[in-house]
């Protein structure tokens, strides 16, 4: 199945507040639609740096701005969508087969990613022309 950018949604996560702070949970089988196989996070991203520039054949992810803010640009080969993430209770669900670029990392930001698969380099499409061909012919 080929997903498009409109299938990549922002999910609002519940916040447990008390006088000593806030807590948000992401849990397999509850607000996560796949079994989490890997967690990684991007940090110390220099001002003006851009990351991403690839798609995945099968991987899906939830992305959270655990601290600070940044922008994801999603692209399904036909349409693009920009999503600004700036709060730890908002998770962006990125479906497979979507090209992504990341930019505008604020100082001290942390991009937390929950992934449906282990790291497999063969799951990446890192060339945009290959991505366009995959979207067209699949
Ligand atoms: C994505 C965005 C949000 C590993 O060895 N293991 C890993 O689990 C990951 C994610 C990366 N790496 C290595 C592979 C590269 O040599 O770390 C290096 C940087 O990886 P990459 O260029 O993929 O990093 P980003 O920030 O462009 O993209 C990452 C994820 O790879 C990607 O799935 O969607 O974060």
Image (tube, rainbow, N blue to C red):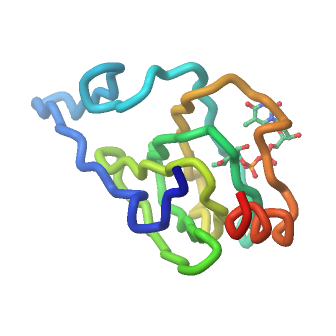
Judged from this view, the residue extending furthest toward the front is 137
Quadrant location of the C terminus in the rendered image: bottom right
Q: Is residue 51 visible?
A: no
Please provide percent x and percent y for residue 40.
63, 31
Judged from this view, the residue extending furthest toward the bottom is 79
Please provide percent x and percent y for residue 137.
73, 64
| Vertical order, 69 against 23 (above or below) | below
For residue 73, what is the image quadrant? bottom right
Residue beneath the point at 46% across and 42% down: 62
Residue beneath the point at 13% across and 34% down: 17
The quadrant where ligand 1 appears is top right
Given residues 130 and 45, the one toward you in this image is 130
Q: Is residue 66 visible?
A: yes
Judged from this view, the residue extending furthest toward the left is 18
Q: What is the total number of numbered labels drawn onto the structure image?
A: 0
| Vertical order, 136 against 16 (above or below) | below
Please provide percent x and percent y for residue 111.
56, 46
For residue 18, what is the image quadrant? top left
Residue beneath the point at 75% across and 57% down: 54
| Vertical order, 45 against 128 (above or below) | above
Residue beneath the point at 57% across and 63% down: 106
Task: Using residue 33 as the reference point, say whether residue 36 is left or right of it.
Answer: right
Task: Using residue 108 as the reference point, say whether residue 46 is left or right of it.
Answer: right
Given residues 60 and 47, the one toward you in this image is 60
């Amino acid at each position: 199945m080929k997903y498009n950018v409109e299938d990549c949604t922002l999910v609002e996560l519940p916040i447990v507040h008390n006088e000593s702070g806030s807590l948000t949970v992401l849990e397999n089988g509850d607000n996560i639609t796949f079994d989490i196989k890997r967690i990684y996070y991007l940090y110390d991203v220099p001002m003006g740096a851009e990351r991403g520039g690839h798609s995945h054949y099968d991987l899906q992810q939830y992305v959270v701005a655990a601290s600070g803010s940044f922008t994801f640009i999603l692209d399904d080969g036909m349409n693009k969508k920009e999503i600004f993430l700036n709060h730890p209770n908002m998770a962006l669900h990125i479906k497979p087969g979507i090209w992504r670029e990341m930019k505008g990392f604020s100082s001290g930001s942390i991009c937390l990613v929950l992934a449906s698969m282990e790291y497999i380099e063969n799951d990446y499409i890192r060339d945009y022309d290959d991505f366009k061909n995959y979207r067209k012919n699949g």
